Amino acid sequence: MLKKIARFKSPNTNNTLVELYKFKHIKHYYWKPKNGELNFGDHLARVIITKILADKGHLLEEETSSERRLLGLGSILHFAQENDVIWGTGINGKIEQDQYKFKQLDVRAVRGPLTREFLLHKGISVPEVYGDPAMLFPQIFPGRFTRVNKKKYVTVPNLHDITIAKEKNWQNLISPLDSWNTCITRILEAELVIASSLHGLIIAEAYGIPARYIRLSETENLLKYNDYMMGTGRASIEYAKHIQEALEMGGMDSPVFDTQKLLQAFPIDLWE
């Protein structure tokens, strides 16, 4: 039985109601902007983990034998705490090394070899299982989203690039602040995806759509893009500086990725 012990308004999430329960459960951490909005790429973590659990007959909100914390997807490894479970997460090139406070983690998969190398250097065991969980979308949502090729290209700015993209009058712009399913549906309307959003690139490539990284600012460190590229069998990322150059360059080399290996690394044992 659910034993609700608190219901309150969180000061950091625009009056979002948060519920705490008395029983032990797995806590899922993913990054959200402080203003309470949901950033498309980061929110995919919640969508993916919720769907995988549901397919296996489980929910996040259920009692478990232990109380652990799971980090899956995103450049959020610096938020990890001692003995957290890591699945498909990566390091953030903007964060100083002394901000990574943990000494031991339960790592099931990481985004790419740059994250693995970082953790190995800290003496943490890391299996050679790579990939961003967003690459699993076609497999865990079979038939839900389909390509339609309505537009020559769409553009997907990173959260920090929205203002720049609007000032440059980007055409067919998809805001990362739109709902996750709207973003995916609109991405799949394109013959080419031009994005500074990492997950704009990842969703496109997961569905076989050519994608090109466009660099609008120096806000985002290149490390996360290179980590993803190397985790999918490619060299460092090559980027365009403007839309016309992106159109001329076309899509990046196709990813080489084993969806089964990453999916099998999902820590379902935390629930079972």
Image (cartoon, grey):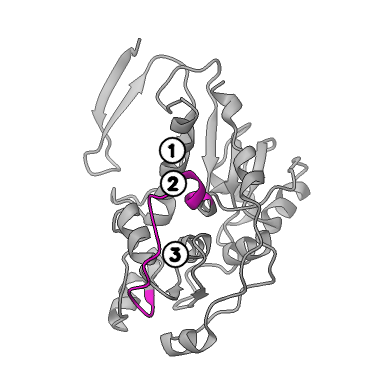
Q: How far is disc 1 from disc 2 in space, using C-alphas?
A: 8 Å
Q: How far is disc 1 from disc 3 in space, using C-alphas?
A: 20 Å
The residue under label 2 is which amino acid type?
Answer: Phe
Find residue 200 and name its label: 3
**Residue 119: x %, y % from top left:** 71, 48
The residue under label 1 is which amino acid type?
Answer: Lys
Is 212 situated above or below 53?
Answer: below
Residue at 49% x, 61% y is 207
**Residue 192: x %, y % from top left:** 44, 76
Is residue 211 visible in the rendered structure shown here? yes
The answer to if 74 sits in the magenta stretch is no
Which SS class for mark 3? helix
Tag 1 near tag 2, CB within 8 Å = yes
Residue 162's quadrant in the figure?
bottom left
Is 6 situated above or below 35?
Answer: above
Q: Residues within 10 Å of mark 3 (few under 14, many from 20)?
A: many
Q: How far is disc 2 from disc 3 in space, using C-alphas?
A: 17 Å
Q: Which residues are magenta?
A: 136-154
Tag 1 near tag 3, CB within 8 Å = no
